[in-house]
Image (cartoon, coloured by chain):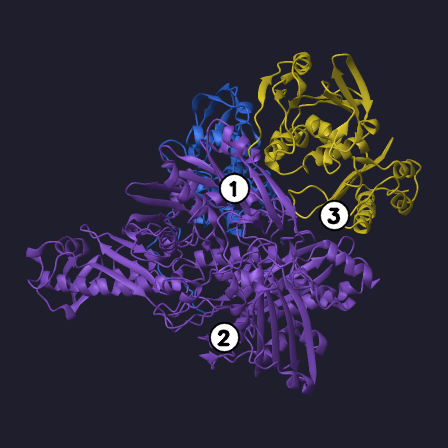
Amino acid sequence: MSTVSVSITVNGERRTHEVEPRVLLVHYLRDVLRLTGTHVGCDTSNCGACTVILDGAAAKSCTVLAVQARECEITTIEGLAAPGEPFSAVQQGFHQEHGLQCGYCTPGMIMACTALLAENPDPTEHEIRHALEGNLCRCTGYQMIVNSVRWAADHPDGIVPESSDAAPSAPAMQGAES
Amino acid sequence: MSLIGARVLRKEDPNLITGRGQFVDDITLAGTVVMAFVTSTEPHSRILAIDASEALALPGVLAVWTASDLAGLSTLGLPGLGRPLLATDVVRFVGEPVAVVVAETKYLAADAAQLVIVDYESMPAAASITAALADGAPVLHSVLGGNTVFDQPFADDLESDFSAAPHTASLHLVNNRCAAVPIEPNACLADWGPSGLTLWATFQAPHHLRNTIASYFGIPQDTTRVITPDVGGGFGAKINFVPEYFLACALSRTLARPVKYTQTRSECQVLMYHGRAQEQDVDVAYDDEGKLLALRVRVTQDQGAYPDPTGMGLPVLTTAMAAGCYKIPKVAVSWRNVVTNTTPVAAYRGAGRPEASYVIERIIDLVADQSGLDPVEVRRRNFIPADEFPYATHSPLAVYDSGNFAGAQTELLTLFDYDALKVEQARRRATQDEKLIGIGFSSWLEIAAFGPPGSLEGFGHLGSWESVQIRVQPDGSAIIYTGASPHGQGTVTTFAQIAAGELGIPFDKISVRHGDTATVPQGIGTMGSRATAVGGEGVRTASVRVVERAKVIAAHILEADPADIVLDGDGFAVNGTPSHAVPWSEVAWKSFRPLEIPADSEPGSLDITVFQQVPNFSFPSGAYCCTVEIDRGTGEIEITGMYLVDDCGTVINPLLAEGQVHGGVAQGIAQALYEGISYDANGIPQNSTLMDYLIPAATELPSYTSGRANTPTPNNGLGAKGIGESGSVGTPPAVVNAVVDALSHLGVQHLDMPITPLSVWNVLEEAK
Amino acid sequence: MIAASFDYVEATSVEHAISLFAEHEDAKFLAGGHSLIPMMKLRLVSSSVLIDIGRIAELSYIEDRGDHVALGALTRHRELESSTVLAEHLPLLAHVAGEVGDPQVRNRGTLGGSLVHGDPAADLPAASLALGASMVITGAGGTRVVPAAEFFLNFLETAVGDGELLTEIRFPKRTGAGWAYQKFNRRAMDYAIVAVAVQLGQNPGIALVNMGSTPHLALAASAALAAGAPATAIVDAVLEGTAGWNDANATREYREHLARVLTSRALAQAGYTS
């Protein structure tokens, strides 16, 4: 079994390994680099759980060979927040607006949303849904994912305003009982 | 201060949104080898020979097992109809594993699996209920004689009531087979070493799996450990005992290496048990006012190739809930379970109750159509009144706890302008080309909060309780351990919310642990919308008891009577004297210090375990409306509105509750318009990838508009009924009713799910 | 999910790619990989060596050449979608590129890869037919130009022979002319069940997706369009030469009906008047 020497910059760090040509980028990230945040959810390039940002554009890492990504720059979910910061704006948006439940599609979904906002910082609901047409979620029904992206668009620095009722000590909601 | 009803953000999120979650395939142990299946390409064949020689010759392959290597490992499921871990002499569905290979890496395991050659002798297959019940049908299990596993006939088929009735309506319905499609397929990692067995599995009930594995292998439970780490969706399909768990353990024991199995999606589509797959014949008798006089429902449940215990129970739940929200004087139900050469069928979100709401909500719409009455009005005339609860139905299982069906319907109608929509619908019908409008209602309820004592035992579980243990730490923080086993529901957050209010300990100082039989006291698991209604109640009652004990210690510190101690601020105080107080952290610390507690007290008393029971099921309900537009040129259906009023009793966290509804609604829309596992006449699955099994993306689904209703349940102190499956119960009939409504002027009375543009176009063509 | 083993070599130029192909038995070219890799993962296709042409930088360009626009075969769908040159002179092409798959697919897939794969269910082959494109094919024996109408030979088989590369695709400009693409599918990410591409103006064309074993140029309908026939006559002619079939998505009758309806809608959307 022949191998190829592959050097890829992942989350700012240049990594070099010998890999079999048939190894998928998603398996290289997960099994060789041990960055297990990127997930596998299907085998026909439909679900998008494997989405990473490859040379500035969202890509399904299950449909790219590791060898094809030589000398490229990849950002995975683990590399999204700036050093010293816990969450990016999109990550914070998913937290604020309950854009995740089981969390399995979430890394790929967040990467796709991040790529969207980099190109279109103020998308409409229609544009958000279309940007996510290749990312499947079985838990949320997507409405709260759309809300999460809108939160990030409205708060591009990812800072949660003081007056938000998101604090756990918030009083009981009016209208919880009809 | 109570957090009940507060929009609290999830404790679960930080790990998951940063890629630090831990799903089974993320976990690596030194020396792990990989297991892969060789699966049957035939639906019903004899296995003549299996040649694994080429596979075994591949470097890096450790083993290839077939049924002959599994001496002493028994079948799964029902006695006499059990499913072997690997097919023995006969395969009974496409995808059934016939061999398992183990290799150093998953790439090698995939190569090895391809090299195993299986020689089949085809037999006729019966891949549908009709085929399985036909004269001369191939028999799957000779012990049955035919393909009917069980048949519960009508006690009284009400024929005289129907003959005498002013009007009757009838439908033959198909509740289409669905695949659960959690985005994480099945996976497990078994590590069987000298000191015992640890199994990681993406499963909904770790203790249940632990108990079953231990019993299966005849090993003690104390050295058997099951861990369910982060689970990427379950929807009821990750509660079944499938061969991979047992095979991974057996292989680990034999090979003395950890063994990992990660299912591909294509495998998942045929191996993870399917849901729904019911056919129903329903008749109603009604009077001139559209009041229902009698209901008769006959259910036929497709069990797939091997009947699963939960799968066998689905039609029991369907028939119990068949009368829905309505007061129907006479109800007759019967059901039967049939095997077919297909993937086994078991629970999938709603598990028998979406099937029930579909039956009653479709037939009542037909009553409306036949009588020329408004579907909202016909429902209103038949609702069980709000003051008749608890309401005993035709089924001893279903004594409805509370509900206000008319109230929910009224609230629903405030969310959109029904009259204006009907006017527009009529206007468009008169044109040639404009898109047709359809408006579909669903007043539904379902049976949740599984369940009263004895209920889950009937499905093979140890009990119907749920365990909650609260341990206050020396610094005043608290850890809750629970047998509830979430897979997206946000249980950690919900339980911490409940506890925070009762304990007086801040939300941020409460952790919730689950999913490990080594650390959590016995548990039952998460299914049947029970986590909050049963487990959450356990958190409440355990918290109350912790506080009782804490007050004893606080009283001792404050030199007061425990009866005069109240929760106050960040600790305890003497009632009426807030300055005479002690913080929780001090009470917690001292609870471990014998010299600082009453002489007759034990250290470590702030540790309470509850096995919470509930006296009855709860019955969430709601009123939904779906509006659609139909393109007359192509038959395309677009959902233009999805209006949702849910009554789950007390809402602990409105954000999480709404998320559960959205997810269930999405699956309901998908079942109605997109999904449907299909087999050709020869038993070959037609849609076993996500390219041809249509899970909708964000572009296919609408936004949702919610209102709320609330009739608390008396079954627990929280008043909470559960909500996890509600969306999937209420939605399919609303969608189907909408499409049928759009086409009713052409004489359409029913369309089977999934309703596709093709099926709509066929109707439009026929009407020309 | 896991492809069979293969060797891998990288081509640094077109000539290099061609000579590598001659050196290796059972080789395949790898461009964007979004048609090839999914098939290899399901083991529907295998190869003993993949020749990666994806990094041949000089094969990615969009050039205004006066009366036509030339695109390098490795130009990615997303570049077509966002190109101002195409927006002005070939809006049908830009739009259709934006209809392929989903954003992630469009970020990686290439025009040349899609055309050489030649899937009758794909969008860009039909667009190339409607637009009367010319395909520049380079092999050991030199370079030749094949019109789109002669490019798609059989199911997944094109005029590109073994060891040859599609290097450039030339599209005559359609500046200011009406156009439309009507794509009917269940989900936005899905292949079309049926689609119709219409380009008006000089040398108009109508092409169909998924109405035969190859991407289909509707010759009779295109001729009727060129002759200024009424829209109804064009619609009546559009099925000529097609071969419908029954599958899970559509019966033959429904497929043919969709082709007609979508053609009618495309003509209206393109602003066609007879």
On residue B404, which mark appears? 2
Residue C154 seen in the current view: yes
Q: What residue lies at 69% left-to-right and 85% top-to-bottom? A: B163
Secondary element under disc 3, as helix, strand or loop, is: loop
- In the image, B157 versus A105, the foreground residue is B157
Q: On the image, which quarter does residue C158 sit in?
A: top right
Decide if residue B617 is on the left or right side of residue C29: left
Q: Colour of chain C?
A: yellow
Q: Provide the letter of the chain coloured purple.
A: B
Q: CA distance from mark 3 to mark 2?
A: 47 Å
Letter of the chain that mark 3 sits on in the rendering: C
* Front residue of B182 and C226: B182
In the image, which lettered chain appears blue? A
Give, as a three-letter code, the residue at label 2.
Asn
Q: Position of residue B55 (x, y in %)?
A: 53, 32
* B248 lies above or below B350: above
Residue in the picture at 79% in, 51% down = C254
What number of labels is visible?
A: 3
Q: Which residue is mark 3?
A: C247
Image vertical order of residue B572 relative to residue C47, above or below: below
Q: What is the quadrant of the C terminus of chain B in the image?
A: bottom right
Q: Which mark is residue B99?
A: 1
Residue type at mark 1 is Ala
